[in-house]
Image: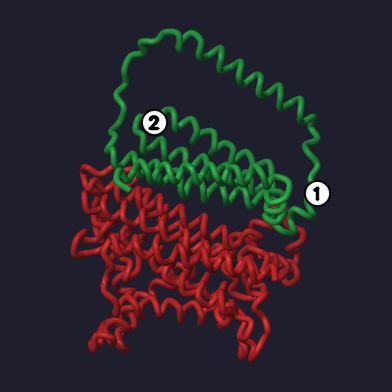
Amino acid sequence: MEALLKLLSDNVAGYGSLASPLQYLLPMVLASLCCIALVALFPIVAVYAERKVAAHMQDRLGPMRVGGWHGWAQTIADGIKLLLKEDIIPSEADRVLFKLAPLVVFAGGFASLVVLPFGASVIVSDLNIGVLYVVAISSLGVVGIIMAGWASNNKYALFGGMRAAAQIVSYEIPAVMAILTVVIPVGSLSTQEIVRAQEGGWLGIGNWFIFKPVTAVAFLVYYLASLAEVNRTPFDIPEAESELVAGYHTEYSGMRFAFFMLAEYVNMFVVSAIGATLFLGGWNSPVFGGPVAFMLKSVALVFVQFWLRWTLPRLRVDQLMYVSWKVLLPASFVLVILAGALAVR
Amino acid sequence: MEIAVFLFLSGIAIVAAANILVQRHPIYSALSLIVTFVALAGIYIQMHAEFIAVMQIVVYTGAIMVLFIFVIMLLNAGAEQKVPDKVHVVKYFGLPLASLLIFEAGLTASRTFDGEGIPVESASINLSGNTEMIGRALYTQYALPFEVTSVLLLVAIVGAIVMAKKEL
């Protein structure tokens, strides 16, 4: 955002003579508009991509008709349909919380975009607690999910909400531990500092944390835990349709349901982008750096999420808790100790 | 600008805190408490205590309040019924005692801050988001209290397991 402020004051005539709160407010508004554009556009592309990926993995064609070429306009049509749909609130539901819940879930994902380092100077705000901020903000989304489950006054929704909360709270711990293995050698929580620490090395990729012994395993731990945190297969127990209809958003329709979908895809992008920042060198790249490299890495990780979803079956609840507490957590503890030992030397 | 943000955040915190008491349903009270915590975190950020702000959200909203809401939902607690106060003592002593408390707090605050505030070496704080400073202080000056707290938490964990699992 500082870069944006400098850009505005250098190139727009008379920008310095504006009132000082306005000078700071304008870049803020512009930056949040960019984030909103990303948040609105990414799910449209990602939903289409996921349907195509799923279809081709199952030897189908997927959406082919809407818009002509390979059905590219399918998600836009679906979005319009969701906008125009009747908004149903169950008569026994708690109206205030029912309306508030999708917004809280969405805000949790949206606010994480602030610290994503798209490029050397393309970042909304390089907070000095960057990674920790994402962890904190994403825990707000849990509150929204519980609110949705409870306010719907529906047993499936309530079960879905409780499963989601239990799952996200459990998997947060191994995820944070895995993040810690990167934070220890870098010595900073700022996302930009972490990316800068991965510059250079063999072929320009040698310093990425995925190519170093301890953090390579940590990447696996982080990736598995992040799958569980965004409720993706094989950890999509909160929305297991065979048992729970649709989980915590069973009772939602129209635009409110769309908000849950948006939040899910934004969260998928955020955890992948954080993975790319921490382990895959962020915007560093041997060929071309900057936002393009960053987006490619994030989208590649999102693709792996699709891939896993259409390959693996769903775990049971007890298996889910087993993986978190008895496999990932001890493994991440060992990794943190190893990372600490390596840092001391 | 700073004062406007501070007034906005503290206004939210106070209104939400009052809402905790006014609401009859425990879920609403718990959610208002979350709003208060988030507003407080905003005030911490304004004071350049980013680490504390984030910890506030991680610990209170992410862990403790989620647990609270869980328990409230599992118990299926409904809205409280309004019952006439049997204890008249509360009525007669509540207001004077509350005003005394506020007066005392104001007095202490006005004595410690004589309009100057506490000087901070903001340059060093801004550099590392005081995460490093907190870590250094915890593991050198306050190492013993820190370790004692850890043992205490460990005891609590062991106790919880013993109570939850009757047959070990």
Q: Which residue type does callout 2 highlight?
A: Gln
Q: Which residue type does callout 1 highlight?
A: Glu
Rendered view: A149 above or below A298: above
Viewer-side residue, A80 vs B51:
B51
Can residue A264 be seen in the rendering of this structure? Answer: no
Which numbered disc, 1 or 2, marks the residue that appears first in the sequence? Answer: 2
Instruction: Calculate the distance from the C-alpha at mark 1 to the C-alpha at mark 2.
Output: 42 Å
Viewer-side residue, A144 vs A235:
A235
Return the x and y of residue A143 as percentages of the image width and height: 40, 50
Can residue A125 be seen in the rendering of this structure? Answer: yes
Return the x and y of residue A322 as percentages of the image width and height: 34, 62
Rendered view: B100 above or below B23: above
- Label of residue B121 in the image: 1
- Label of residue B23 in the image: 2
- Label of residue A252 in the image: none
Colour of chain A in the rendered structure image: red
Rendered view: A135 above or below A79: above
Mark 1 belongs to which subunit?
A: B
Colour of chain B in the rendered structure image: green
Element type where label 2 sits in the image: loop
* Number of residue marks: 2
Mark 2 belongs to which subunit?
A: B
Q: Residue at x 53, y 41 (%)?
A: B152
Q: Residue at x 71, y 24 (%)?
A: B108
Quadrant placement of the N terminus of chain A = bottom right
Q: Residue at x 30, y 50 (%)?
A: A149
Name of the residue lying farthest toward the front: B168
Quadrant placement of the C terminus of chain A = bottom right
